[in-house]
Amino acid sequence: MTGVNDDVPGGRELLRVEGVTKSFPGVRALDGVDLSLRTGEVHVLLGENGAGKSTLIKMLSGAHRPDEGRILADCGADGGTNGAPGSGAQGLREVHIRSAQDAERLGIATIYQEFNLVPGLTVAENIFLGRQPRTALGLVDRKTMRARAAELLRRVRLDVSPSTPVSELGIARLQMVEIAKALSLEARVLIMDEPTAVLTSDEVETLFGIVRELRADGVGIIFITHHLDEIGALGDRVTVLRDGRSVDEVPASTDEEELIRLMVGRDISEQYPRTRPDAPGAPLLRVRGLTRHGVRSSKGSPARPAFEGIDFEVRAGEVVGLAGLVGAGRTEVARAIFGVDRYDAGTVEVGGTELARGDVRAAMRAGLGLVPEDRKGQGLVLDASLQDNLTLARLDRDTRRGLVDRGGQRREAAAVAGQLKVRMSGLGQSARTLSGGNQQKIVIGKWLLAETRLLILDEPTRGIDVGAKVEIYQLINELTAAGCAVLMISSDLPEILGMSDRVLVMAQGRLAGELPAAEATQDAVMELAVRSPKGAAPPDAGHTPSTNKNHPGQSAMEGSDD
């Protein structure tokens, strides 16, 4: 891709990547990648986890530098090579992006999948961090900063005060703050890494509206997504990466089957390959009357319970899906079952034995495992090795007289990493350096090694490419075929319908109904999800944003609570 293609949408070229390579110890992350971007264009970057997408955008944003190849940018408007002022003439010049400040001067802004916000600061302070408006005396002009932030928040349709600490916001709202922060830079090139992964359908439509406005203003947008249905709705061109190489550039109208084939290098015949049992076995999990009271609002008005009167069971060989709208309480129930969060009434039984409340160790000993929705914050020790992460949940089993059997750990970890097809340079590699999909495999592998009988999966495929999704679905089949069971929470309703043997639907903290697989349709699930359970409080009564910094937002159908 060394020349300008006049047939592609958009105007003049803003950015071009030519033959870029990048290697890390034991891994060639990029191998001769080409990409171009024009004004008024949405260029979708597509590929499996580990294909090189994150490395490429970090290179464009100044976090990494290429080993070979070059990056060219249109520096005429307000930037120059090496971040120096431009001459005012339009046209591509080779640039060297050594820092985020260089990228900003070149008009490049990036919205990362992982938030880059400071919890202790307000929304306005985060939006203008390092770029605060100043008074004539050099002091921070907080009034002007709040006014500018308020305008940006209106632009992204986020009804939050600029003075709100970001620690009080859920995941979906944090994403919109990140978008407002990027818009404040008035960038000419905007890179969006999985921006819809945590948004509800309404919020996705709001985001798409913002993207279309930016495109109309001539902004060039690099858009990364694993939701293939978004490509045709928003994109103009698609560049597909595989194993660090740009394998093809195709129109956004290309059908999904072809896009999948380009991504994974093979045809995937069935997106949800669930093998359903002839008959489930004995109950592995029984939940009876599970209740957690709500918290009164600051004005003293009563709050609806986080969840109330939850009754269900999961049998050996089953996949039970848990669906619900924003704020339904699904993640709260899962965390309470596993002992992470408290509950005020009810019982949890595993294999007929009642578990003590709030005792994670007891849950693990009974054979429960939890893959949380926030894999980085709650599922991994990011700076520890893959071996240590994989064997963490069975450490007591690998310890004899105070000594850890490291050789045995290494053999077990290598076996499960091979089974899950983890892309890694070795077991000594830190979890932080893996792609999102491979990190998720490590979290799941940890519970496989712990010989878990019932696995709770909260958003198991969020931010994961279609090939890795199918691998996780096949693993679910293997678990249930071996007599284990899965309780699956997902924002992806087709995933719930495609992989569940039964679907439980929550509404306003209560179970609204249960549907067998044969009767579980999108319409049937949504009818239950929007139903007001008998005796329930109004939907928003006393609902306050989560302030748990380790758990900033709860899961919800097509998005996160808050």
Image: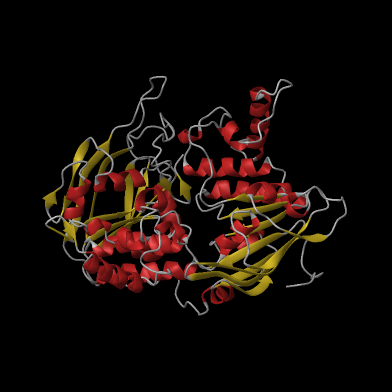
Q: Is 513 above or below relative to 545?
A: below
Name the spot of residue 386 as percent of width and height, x first: 35, 62
Residue furthest to the bottom in view is 266
- The structure's colour scheme is secondary structure
Count of all numbered marks drawn on residues in the image: 0
Q: Quadrant of the N terminus?
A: bottom right
Give the residue at x 44% y 44%: 326
In which quarter of the view is residue 254 placed?
Answer: bottom right
Q: Nearer the viewer, residue 370 or 333?
A: 370
Q: Residue at x 25, y 38 (%)?
A: 342
Whether residue 458 sits left or right of residue 186 in the image: it is left
Side of 331 where 132 appears, left or right: right
Q: Position of residue 380 (x, y in %)?
A: 36, 54
Please indicate, yes or no, whether residue 12 appears anywhere in the rendered image: no
Instruction: Identify which residue, 471 or 401, lies in the foreground.
Output: 401
Position of 83 relative to 240 (above/below): above
Q: Residue at x 62, y 59 (%)?
A: 59
Quarter of the image for residue 440 reads: bottom left
User: 147 left or right of 413?
Assistant: right
Left or right side of 335 for 461: right
Q: Quadrant of residue 449?
A: bottom left
Seen in the picture, residue 280 relative to 112 is either above or below; the reply is below
Q: Is residue 283 visible?
A: yes
Horizontal and vertical percent position of residue 107: 73, 49
222 or 529, nearer to the observer: 222
Residue 551 lies, in percent from the top left, at 39, 42
